[in-house]
């Protein structure tokens, strides 16, 4: 076979599925909802009306000895049969708890209720486990700050018939109606995957799962909701899983994610390690562009201006902590400012299906580039995957002129200093340095955590101390 025939077959194999790929992209156009929500009131299920368990309140909140100390929490919860529902309480279940500041065990009463007291720090890792005869044991792994805000810690126990089940915990900055799908993949090559949509309370179950090795994944339609995959082995007994989102997903959202030189780009990210006023540094192609403070869950936004002389092609926007730890990145594609729209073959400021197919034919060599000069990114001589992706984006979102420069993200002014503590004290670890801001911004921080305020003229920058500590609100 001639060399050019081999090359042609190889190219045809690589591009054969492009029309299907483009069709799928056009049918799938997820809407990103930027709303935020408060944490769920229970760890495993929504509290039922008429429940007899009293609303827990902290029994003691000592003066903070270090930043992040929350106090003593009176933890209450229920153990119930997952298959029969939250009203099917399990009496006599053994409930144990383990945390940096205490551990122990209790038994559920006749109504399946249990309670214990535990001193909490916001970054504590707490494990609560429930076991009962005839059920698979269930474990809940939860941070100190999440446990502090939960009203009831409900543990659902699975009977052996429900082989793999558990709980998916929500991401607090995603909408309450976020779709959550749990995928059970066979670890063996070619093994079929099973999918189920988690219930509104986050519970899920797969019935009659054969013995073997599996990987469990979570898929959501909230871009900043990222769950690490978990591996598990099923060997004759039920398996209960607790799936929690990553506290620092290494992604950034860009709005827009492509445009000509000079485009203003809004950057959104989340990393709990810089929560409550910690600093995120934003870079463009390795050059520091700006610094911003994160909110109470580590959420942050920044505005980045692409240079007027930026080269056509891919550019990287990244974020780090002050110490240089990578906490997110995303690609921004710079296009030709003189080209109205990538893939707009007829110049009518719209990209249509027939124009996408023309681009595919050019890529396959079945059409000349003169059929659609707008199919090429400036500097390229052939139609590449990045050009097709850009054209699909234009087909989905339109070929409007570049949007006006977004309103700048409000930056805290230097009217004072906010501390993540009850008494204007701080320490060197993590995001807990005092940070300059307005009193109003300090008041916006997470209600229920201790914060204090120091007017600018009372703050000693050399020592971090304050001579007139105040309640910020």
Image (cartoon, rainbow, N blue to C red):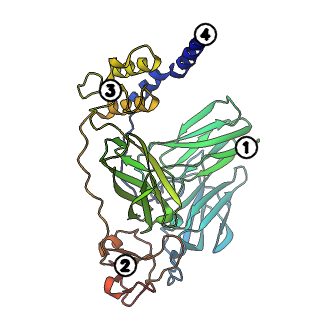
Which numbered disc flags the more N-terminal residue, 4 or 3?
Answer: 4
Q: If you read the primary sequence from the N terminus, does the residue marked by circle 4 or circle 2 appear first?
A: 4
Q: Nearer the viewer, residue 167 or 335?
A: 335
Task: From the viewer's side, name the closer residue of 176 and 414.
Answer: 414
Circles 3 and 1: CB atoms closer than 8 Å? no
Which x, y percent locates residue 410? Answer: 29, 63
The answer to whether 441 appears left or right of 274 in the picture is left
What is the spatial separation of the Cα atoms under label 4 and label 3, in whole angstroms?
33 Å
Q: Secondary structure at mark 1?
A: strand
Query: Which disc is residue 374 wearing?
Result: 3
Marks 4 and 1, how far apart in space? 51 Å
Please state which of the two labelled residues, at mark 1 or mark 2, is closer to the viewer. 2
Callout 2: 10 Å neighbours few (<14), some, many (20+)?
A: many
Task: Count neighbours of disc 3 (C-alpha within 10 A) and say few if under 14, some if 14 to 19, many if 20 or more.
Answer: many
Contact (Cβ within 8 Å) of mark 1 with mark 2: no
Q: Position of residue 192 (x, y in %)?
A: 64, 30
> Where does label 4 land, which residue?
2
Viewer-side residue, 165 vs 172: 172
Q: Does the image show residue 111?
A: no
Graded by Cα atoms within 10 Å as few (under 14), some (14 to 19) or many (20 or more), the crowding at tag 1 reads few
Disc 3 is placed on an element classified as helix
In space, the residues marked 1 and 2 are separated at their CA atoms by: 51 Å
In 3D space, how far apart are the residues under numbered discs 3 and 2 (Cα atoms)? 53 Å
Mark in front: 4 vs 1? 4
Q: Earlier in the sequence, mark 3 or mark 2?
A: 3
Give the quarter of the figure containing the C terminus. Answer: bottom left
- Residue beneath the point at 61% across and 10% down: 2
Residue at numbered disc 2? 417
Find the distance from the CA under tag 3 to the CA under tag 1: 52 Å
Q: As displayed, is residue 36 above or below residue 20?
A: below
Q: Which is closer to the viewer, label 4 or label 2?
A: 4
Residue position marked by numbered label 1 in the rendering = 233
């Amino acid at each position: 076979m001639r060399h050019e025939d081999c090359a042609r077959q190889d190219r045809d194999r690589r591009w054969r599925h492009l029309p299907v790929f483009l069709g799928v992209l056009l049918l799938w156009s997820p809407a990103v909802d930027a709303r935020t929500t408060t944490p769920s009131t229970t760890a495993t299920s929504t509290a039922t009306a008429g429940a007899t368990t009293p609303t827990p309140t902290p029994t003691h909140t000592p003066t903070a000895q270090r930043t992040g100390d929350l106090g003593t929490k009176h933890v209450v919860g229920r153990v119930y049969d997952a298959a029969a529902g939250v009203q099917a309480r399990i009496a006599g279940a053994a409930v144990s708890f383990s945390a940096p500041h205490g551990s122990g065990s209790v038994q559920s009463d006749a109504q399946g209720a249990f309670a214990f007291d535990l001193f909490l720090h916001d970054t504590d890792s707490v494990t609560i486990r429930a076991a009962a005869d005839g059920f698979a044991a269930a474990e809940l792994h939860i941070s100190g700050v999440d446990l502090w805000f939960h009203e009831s810690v409900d543990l659902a126990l699975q009977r052996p018939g429900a082989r793999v089940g558990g709980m998916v915990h929500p991401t607090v900055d995603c909408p309450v109606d976020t779709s959550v799908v749990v995928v059970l993949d066979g670890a063996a090559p070619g093994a079929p995957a099973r999918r189920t949509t988690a219930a509104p309370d986050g519970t899920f179950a797969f019935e009659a799962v054969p013995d073997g090795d599996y990987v469990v994944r979570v898929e959501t339609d909230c871009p900043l909701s990222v769950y690490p995959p978990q591996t598990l082995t099923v060997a004759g007994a039920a398996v209960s899983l607790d799936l929690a989102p990553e506290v620092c997903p290494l992604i950034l959202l860009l709005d827009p994610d492509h445009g000509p030189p000079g485009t203003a780009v809004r950057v959104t990210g989340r990393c709990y390690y810089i929560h409550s006023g910690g600093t995120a540094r934003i870079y463009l192609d390795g050059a520091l562009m700006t610094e911003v403070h994160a909110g109470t869950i580590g959420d942050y936004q920044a505005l980045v201006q692409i240079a007027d002389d930026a080269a056509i092609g891919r550019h990287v926007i990244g974020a780090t902590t002050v110490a240089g730890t990578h906490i997110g990145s995303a690609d921004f594609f710079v296009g030709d400012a003189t080209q109205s729209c990538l893939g707009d073959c007829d110049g009518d400021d719209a990209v249509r299906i027939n124009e996408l197919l023309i681009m595919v034919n050019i890529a396959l060599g079945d059409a000349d580039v003169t059929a659609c000069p707008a199919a090429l990114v400036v500097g390229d001589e052939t139609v590449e995957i990045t050009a097709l992706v850009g054209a699909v984006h234009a087909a989905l979102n339109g070929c409007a002129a570049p949007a006006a420069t977004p309103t700048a993200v409000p930056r805290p002014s230097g009217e004072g200093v906010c501390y993540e503590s009850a008494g204007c004290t701080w320490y060197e670890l993590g995001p807990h340095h005092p940070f300059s801001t307005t009193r109003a911004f300090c008041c916006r921080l997470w209600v229920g955590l201790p914060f204090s305020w120091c007017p600018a003229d009372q703050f000693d920058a050399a020592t971090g101390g304050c001579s007139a500590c105040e309640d910020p609100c």
